[in-house]
């Protein structure tokens, strides 16, 4: 009896866009008194640029944030304004806008340091995160994306202990609400003018596994997942395929279940000058023997990163095969192939969230930014559809007929 022949059934992923791409889509004088207007207008904007989903960004309102916008490399967006709790009335308004526009919600995002040393500041951030959790439930999404963070006063092992003490309770709250907490892995080197580089302890597969084991011990292993962003891997000299292979080898390839689609283009001159530790002195973030009190000076702490590389909005960097092989920028096609080949995911239920942090194109004008984001979303969709077609053809159709795949392809651990 002949073996059944598989049909060609490619599984593209779900395209979304992080609303921090355009922070002031709705002017603050309009959205502060009518906070849900910003969400409505972003849903309309997302429809217009061809993105079927949004990742809804929220943050502490500028009037109460402990980090001035002048000190941020990529300022956050409180598109979802949670100064007041998000209740059923507000949720009904947003869901009506979702139905009208046909744009869905991939998840909610709140990026902040959840292990900050100051007890009062940490309490504010955790209480705000609980508001995000509650909003996610009312909006009927099952995930929130954010950071773990770091206590800069402590070394790494004590930070693991602090994670167990103060972050596990957050995951228990997520579990009680049926939510997953997806951790974005940016090391956040510029969060502090101190000589600290890894300021989000969940920055790579080794730490993810260590943190997940703590979560498992407390019954919240299923709540801890990774929202993988390849730009940060490039920043740290890693390549996506090798990282995914490592997770599979260690039995943790289930940890990644969503993606930020943001690249990084390495500046070889900056690496030659400073190495991958970034600029370590004379950055301009210190005054004498102490960190500067001026937030604009504190922005210079990000020279730990920006001397090495620049963020890429998908589709805006030149096609450069040599750079792909040297891990100086993201090989998007292989990224999407490796995800399907090595991770324990259902591609059809996995989100690709376009995150715009390419400095020259961070335009806060709707009409000028719209075609840029539209092009990036189209690129992301096309490259993922190509990967879905290749995977289905090679790993399902041809495999069912015993037809060999030609060539070798990119291999893990060969960078």
Image (tube, helix red, strand yellow):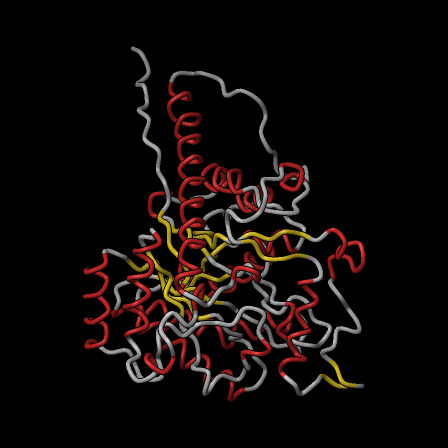
Q: Which residue is nearer to you in this view: 266 or 277?
A: 266
Vertical side of 212 occupied by 60: above or below: below
Q: Dividing the image into 4 quarters, which one contains the C terminus?
A: top right
Residue at the extreme top of the image, as rendered: 1
Quadrant hosting residue 205: bottom right
Vertical side of 287 occupied by 186: above or below: above
Vertical side of 121 occupied by 178: above or below: above
**How far from the left and from the top, in percent, is residue 159?**
61, 72
Quadrant hosting residue 53: bottom left
Q: Which residue is nearer to you in this view: 358 or 171?
A: 358
**How far from the left and from the top, in percent, is residue 146?**
46, 67
Q: Which residue is nearer to you in this view: 65 or 248?
A: 65
- Is 247 on the left or on the right of 146, as rendered? right
Q: For the point 42% across and 51% down, which residue is it?
A: 352
**How far from the left and from the top, in percent, is residue 23?**
43, 70
- Is 398 on the left or on the right of 177, as rendered? right
Q: Which residue is nearer to you in this view: 98 or 126?
A: 98
Counting every numbered tag in the picture gives 0
Q: For the point 49% across and 64% down, which residue is it?
A: 363
**How far from the left and from the top, in percent, is residue 329?**
62, 47
Quadrant hosting residue 322: top right
Q: Dividing the image into 4 quarters, which one contains the N terminus?
A: top left
Residue at the extreme front of the image, as rendered: 367
Q: For the point 71% across and 62% down, which residue is it?
A: 307
């Amino acid at each position: 009896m002949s073996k059944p022949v598989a049909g060609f059934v490619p599984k593209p992923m779900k395209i979304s866009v992080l609303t921090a791409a355009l922070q002031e889509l709705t002017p603050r004088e309009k959205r502060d008194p009518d906070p849900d207007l910003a969400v409505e207008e972003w849903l309309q904007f997302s429809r217009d640029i061809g993105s079927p989903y949004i990742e809804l960004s929220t943050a502490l309102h500028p009037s109460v944030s402990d980090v001035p916008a002048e000190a941020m490399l990529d300022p956050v967006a409180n598109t979802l304004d949670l100064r007041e709790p998000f209740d059923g009335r507000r949720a009904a308004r947003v869901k009506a806008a979702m139905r009208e526009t046909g744009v869905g919600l991939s998840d909610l995002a709140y990026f902040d340091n959840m292990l900050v040393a100051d007890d009062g500041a940490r309490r504010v951030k955790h209480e705000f995160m609980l508001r995000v959790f509650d909003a996610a439930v009312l909006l009927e999404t099952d995930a929130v994306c954010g950071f773990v963070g770091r206590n800069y006063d402590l070394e790494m092992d004590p930070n693991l202990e602090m994670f167990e003490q103060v972050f596990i309770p957050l995951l228990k709250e997520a579990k009680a609400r049926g939510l997953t907490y997806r951790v974005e892995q940016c090391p956040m080197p510029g969060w502090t003018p101190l000589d600290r580089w890894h300021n989000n302890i969940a920055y790579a597969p080794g730490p993810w596994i260590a943190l997940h084991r703590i979560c498992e011990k407390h019954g919240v292993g299923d709540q801890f997942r990774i929202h993988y962003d390849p730009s940060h891997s490039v920043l740290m000299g890693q390549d996506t395929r090798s990282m995914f292979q490592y997770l599979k080898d260690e039995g943790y390839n289930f940890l990644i279940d969503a993606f930020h689609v943001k690249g990084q283009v390495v500046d070889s001159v900056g690496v030659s000058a400073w190495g991958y530790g970034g600029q370590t002195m004379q950055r301009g973030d210190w005054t004498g023997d102490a960190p500067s009190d001026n937030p604009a000076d504190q922005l210079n702490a990000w020279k730990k990163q920006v001397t090495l590389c620049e963020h890429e909005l998908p589709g805006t960097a030149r096609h450069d095969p040599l750079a792909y092989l040297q891990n100086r920028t993201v090989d998007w096609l292989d990224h999407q192939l490796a995800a399907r080949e090595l991770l324990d995911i259902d591609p059809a239920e996995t989100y690709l969230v376009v995150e715009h942090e390419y400095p020259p194109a961070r335009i806060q004008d709707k009409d000028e930014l719209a075609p840029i984001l539209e092009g990036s979303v189209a690129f992301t969709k096309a490259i993922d559809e190509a990967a879905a077609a290749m995977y289905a053809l090679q790993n399902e159709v041809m495999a069912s007929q015993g037809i060999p795949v030609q060539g070798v392809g990119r291999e893990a651990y060969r960078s």
